[in-house]
Amino acid sequence: WGEVGHRTVAYVAYRYLSLNTQVYVDNILNYHDGRDIGDAAIWPDQIKYGRPYTAPWHYIDARDSPPTLCGLNYPADCGDKESDGCIITALHNYTTLFMDPKTHPLTRQEALKYVIHFIGDIHQPLHTEDAFRGGNEIPVCFRKACSHHNLHSVWDRDIVHKLVGIPTAATHEQETKAAKDWADRLVGVDANLSLLKAECDDVVDPDQCSLAWARESNAWICKYVMKPGLEWLSSNDLSLEYFDGAVPIVEYQVKMGGIRLAAWLEAMIARAQSMQ
Ligand code: ADE
Ligand code: ZN
Ligand code: ZN
């Protein structure tokens, strides 16, 4: 996701956290300048260019070929080389590092930011797909503009911006405000609901939950994201009917990302506290 998607996942999650966990998260992030969990969520993208080895941690490249062959194979699809890793192993590693009492406080702070970011990215369907480098190599048009747009960036940003009602080139302030408002709407009336909806019992444990979430995210590739085929995707303006069909998927994925991130943080922080 772009900034709005990541911030919204983080704000939704924060609303579902217990007070104890909210305070714990705020203490670790240690911001004193108005920044918040939304800024933590976008940090791994801001430092990616200075740390190129972290780039493969933002996705898992399912190599079955949509729209005919679908599905995610693990660990085969995790990284070009095993040493590169992927979003599943990166989330696992940073969760483990976070909970280890020997971890340096600054490393623990970074680990928390990575966890917040990766659970968001797992919920962007194209971050679970290899085809055309997760859609980066499929040129498309959106709101009549055909340059600087590809299927991946349309799902990361353009669909989200149109959905929340801000321009493609929005200011940072517009993006932050839009994310807060969208999170409020997604949480809606069921903010007090239990985190059962994370649909996973032992969130931080083995890679079960993150892999199940990645598979659910990847399933949208064949069901919708790449279903129309290359030809259609590249010759239609995706801000029209394609946008309409994408909206409920994006809203579901972002809301579930937030709920699952909350469940993950609750479990991870409870375990970290019990190990201290
Ligand atoms: N590079 C290769 N695969 C990718 C993906 N699924 N998302 C983003 N960047 C990628
Ligand atoms: Zn992306
Ligand atoms: Zn990312």
Image (cartoon, helix red, strand yellow):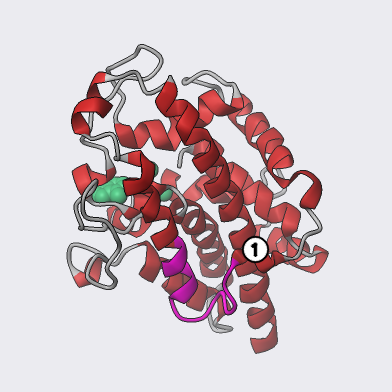
**Residue corresponding to mark 1:** 197
Residue 142 placement, left or right of 260:
left
Picture residue at 46% right of the left edge, 35% below the top: 246
Picture residue at 17% right of the left edge, 67% below the top: 81
Span highlighted in magenta in the image: 199-213
Residue 131 placement, left or right of 14:
left
Could one spot residue 37 in this view of the protein? no
| Residue 220 location (% of width, % of height) | 39, 48
- Outermost residue toward the top in this view: 144
Residue 45 placement, left or right of 130:
right
Look at label 1 and name its amino acid: Lys
User: Is 12 located above or below residue 62 in the figure?
Assistant: above
| Residue 268 location (% of width, % of height) | 61, 74
Could one spot residue 121 in this view of the protein? yes
Disc 1 crowd, CA 10 A, few/some/many (<14, 14-19, 20+)? few
Q: Is mark 1 within 8 Å of ligand 3?
A: no
200 in magenta: yes
Q: Quadrant of residue 29?
A: bottom right
User: Is 56 located above or below residue 166 in the figure?
Assistant: below
Q: Quadrant of the C terminus?
A: bottom right
Mark 1 element type: helix
Picture residue at 57% right of the left edge, 51% below the top: 40
| Residue 134 location (% of width, % of height) | 28, 45
Q: Quadrant of the N terminus?
A: top left
| Residue 266 location (% of width, % of height) | 68, 70
- Outermost residue toward the bottom in this view: 275
User: Is 120 located above or below residue 86 in the figure?
Assistant: above
Main SS of the magenta part reads loop
